[in-house]
Amino acid sequence: MFSSRSSRVARGGLIAAFALSIAAATVPAGAFAADDEPLIDYHNFAGASKSLERNGTADIITSSGRVHQRILRLTAGGYRQSGSAWSNQKVDLRESFETEFKAYLHHGKPGADGIAFVVQTQGARALGGWGGGIGYRFIKPSVAVEFDTFQNTPDPSSNHLAVVMNGDPDVHTAVSEAPIPLYGKPFTAKVTYDAASHNLKVYVKSLHRGDTEQLLLEHTVDLTDAVGDAAWVGFTAATGTALSKQDIYSWTLDGSGV
């Protein structure tokens, strides 16, 4: 698996069903104690305006459907858009961390281009290029975990994950096909980093009842060497000649702050 590299009603019903499944999903337990307070804790994004720096097309909006909640929308369904959002709480990369989020990438056919969870020290205003740059191109130093939904020239498919260094989406340090659809259906993702072994792992899970979390990527990278001792963490996304709405419904991170 690992390598180095229709109607309005029906449509509304699908969106409502997705929103309900997102709200009801249970995230698998991680390696941290249940009574620990997460360093970053957005069960939804109500009240997040002051603690989340948003750039480009990124914004906090109210989701549609029967379940209304505040979500982070990285791209708004237009062409050639790029958005980023960074927590104002920097993370100590000398310590281990675990982060989980729920995402829903939807709206266009085909959909593009995807989202990325990014660790970077360029700053809270960092925003990369649109299209295949997935909003992180040229952000460096950085380490990105991309969830790519459009096949550009260097990509293995339009449904893959990759680890990318220093804002260069044309070079995959590690890559894996996704066994679940990253576009059109909501999913959860988890990224863990062991500071002692420098082991980075990426898991995904669909929100279908009975589905289990799957380990898709495992890569060795010393984040302190690659990025620095403390970094901003957050998300980027982009569209190009194809478009999509790319939403984060919740986000938590267990780790040490700076």
Image (cartoon, rainbow, N blue to C red):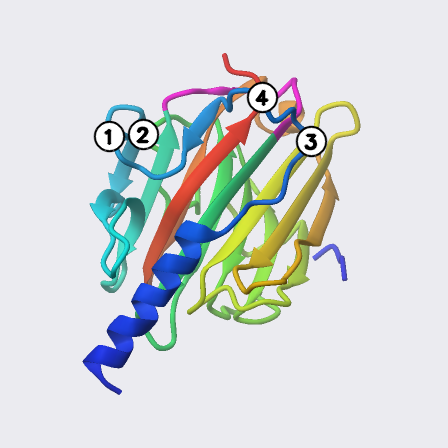
Above or below 247: residue 258: above
Give the SS element for disc 4: loop
The Cα atoms of the two marked residues, 4 and 3, are separated by 12 Å
The part of the image, by quadrant, that contains residue 18 is bottom left
Q: Residue at x 31, y 24 (%)?
A: 51
Q: Residue at x 45, y 66 (%)?
A: 185
Front tag of 4 and 3: 4
Front tag of 2 and 4: 4
The Cα atoms of the two marked residues, 2 and 4, are separated by 24 Å
Mark with earlier residue (2, 3): 3
Magenta region, residue range: 88-97
Q: Residue at x 69, y 43 (%)?
A: 201
- Identify the residue under disc 1: 49
Front residue (pair 128, 31): 31
Q: Quadrant of the N terminus?
A: bottom right
Front residue (pair 143, 85): 85
Front tag of 2 and 3: 3
Give the SS element for disc 2: strand
Q: Residues within 10 Å of mark 4 (few under 14, many from 20)?
A: few
Q: Which mark is residue 35?
A: 4
- Identify the residue under disc 2: 52
Front tag of 1 and 3: 3
- Image location of residue 231, percent across then percent down: 50, 23
Instruction: Residue type at mark 1: give it.
Output: Ser
- Identify the residue under disc 3: 31
- Tell whether 223 sits left or right of 4: left
Mark with earlier residue (1, 3): 3
Q: Residues within 10 Å of mark 3 (few under 14, many from 20)?
A: few
Q: Are marks 2 and 4 in contact (CB under 8 Å)?
A: no
Mark with earlier residue (2, 4): 4
- Image location of residue 117, percent across then percent down: 49, 43
